[in-house]
Each structure stands twice: as structure tokens, then as C-alpha cells.
Amino acid sequence: MSITKGELANRILRLMGVNTRFVEAAPEQVIDTLKYVDDWMMANDGMGRRLGWAQEDEPNPDTPTNLPNWAIMGVSNSMAVYMCPFFEKQIHPSLMINSAIGMQTISDNTISNTPIQFPNTMPLGQGNRTTYGQRYYTKDERISTEGDFLLDDSDSIVITNGGV
């Protein structure tokens, strides 16, 4: 179950040291925090880190964030690092480390590299020729894998056309 936007904003403010055991952030600070989170989430959405953030015209602290549980650490710590200058707070080194760990988790779970097939006219190397003649990437000379193994039972490299 996802946390609400108000809970996320309070977590960010607590990480920065604005919310403490003795002082609670003003409602305006919570709304400002949520506006910064909206901007930050839309920028990450544009980079391919799509987390399902519930975008609103005017942030409501009672709205669920729709963030997966594994993304909350990355979002809260990264937002705390991002917002420390706005609240004139010093960034603690552990905040930076936790932000990096959380963002690596987000990147690992949201961004994937898609395999591409080079066209037949794509040469190997920087020029059109090599000392061994023309070497082009062709579809029938592409290495194919099964699971995590590049070798078949006879210890030879698996390629699609059976050649070298």
C-alpha cells in the first residue's frame, strides 16, 4: 500500500531537519514540498523513471502517491537533498548516500536497455574497411543467448546461422 502525499512530504521534511520531535512544519511548507516533488517527479518521468506519481494541479496531502514501496526511499532522500538549499539546511553525507542507493534501486527497476539490431550497412570500426576485409553487422551473424549462457553444450559460441 502506498503512502499519502502528506506522509511523503513529512518524511522529506524530517530527513532535512525541518520536522523534529519538537517542531512541526507549517501546512504551507508541506504544500511547497509537494509542489517541488511534483516538478521533480515529472522531470524523472521524462527521463524514463516512471513511478506512477499522481499528478495534480494543486497538491492534496491526503491523496495517495501511487509510488511502489521500493521507490519511497529514493524519492524521499533525493527530494531532501534537492530541497535542502530552499530550506537553508545543510546536506548530511548519509542523506547523499541513501539518495544514491534509492535512486539506483529506482533506475534498476524502471529503466531497461532494449537490444538493437544494427543495419547491414553498419561497418565495424571507424572506417569502411579493415585489414581483414569488409566486416558488417548482419542479422544472421548475431549472437543469440539462452538464459545467461553464451555457450552451447559443445562449448562453442552460439550464433543464429551456425557459422563463425
Image (spheres, rainbow, N blue to C red):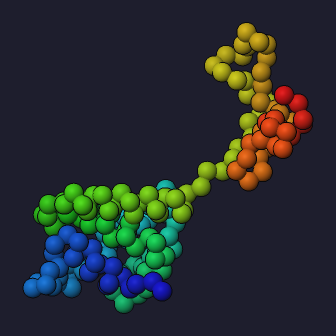
Tally of numbered discs: 0
Q: Residue at x 14, y 60 (%)?
A: 90
**Image quadrant containing the C terminus:** top right
Q: Residue at x 38, y 60 (%)?
A: 101
The quadrant where residue 12 appears: bottom left
Residue 46 can be seen in this image:
no
| Above or below, comparing residue 34 to residue 95 in the picture | below
The residue most toward the top is: 131
Q: Position of residue 33 (x, y in %)?
A: 27, 74
| Above or below, comparing residue 123 to residue 146 in the picture | above
The residue most toward the left is: 22
Q: Position of residue 13 (x, y in %)?
A: 22, 75
The residue most toward the front is: 154
| Above or below, comparing residue 49 to residue 145 in the picture | below
Q: Position of residue 158 (x, y in %)?
A: 81, 39
Q: Residue at x 90, y 36 (%)?
A: 161
Residue 19 can be seen in this image:
yes
Q: Is residue 158 left or right of residue 107?
A: right
The quadrant where residue 88 appears: bottom left
Q: Is residue 44 left or right of residue 134?
A: left
| Above or below, comparing residue 19 to residue 77 in the picture | below
Q: Nearer the viewer, residue 136 or 96?
A: 96
Q: Is residue 84 left or right of residue 43?
A: left
The residue most toward the bottom is: 62
Q: Position of residue 115 (x, y in %)?
A: 69, 47
The quadrant where residue 143 appears: top right
Q: Residue at x 19, y 60 (%)?
A: 92
Q: Nearer the viewer, residue 56 or 143?
A: 143
Q: Nearer the viewer, residue 10 or 34?
A: 10
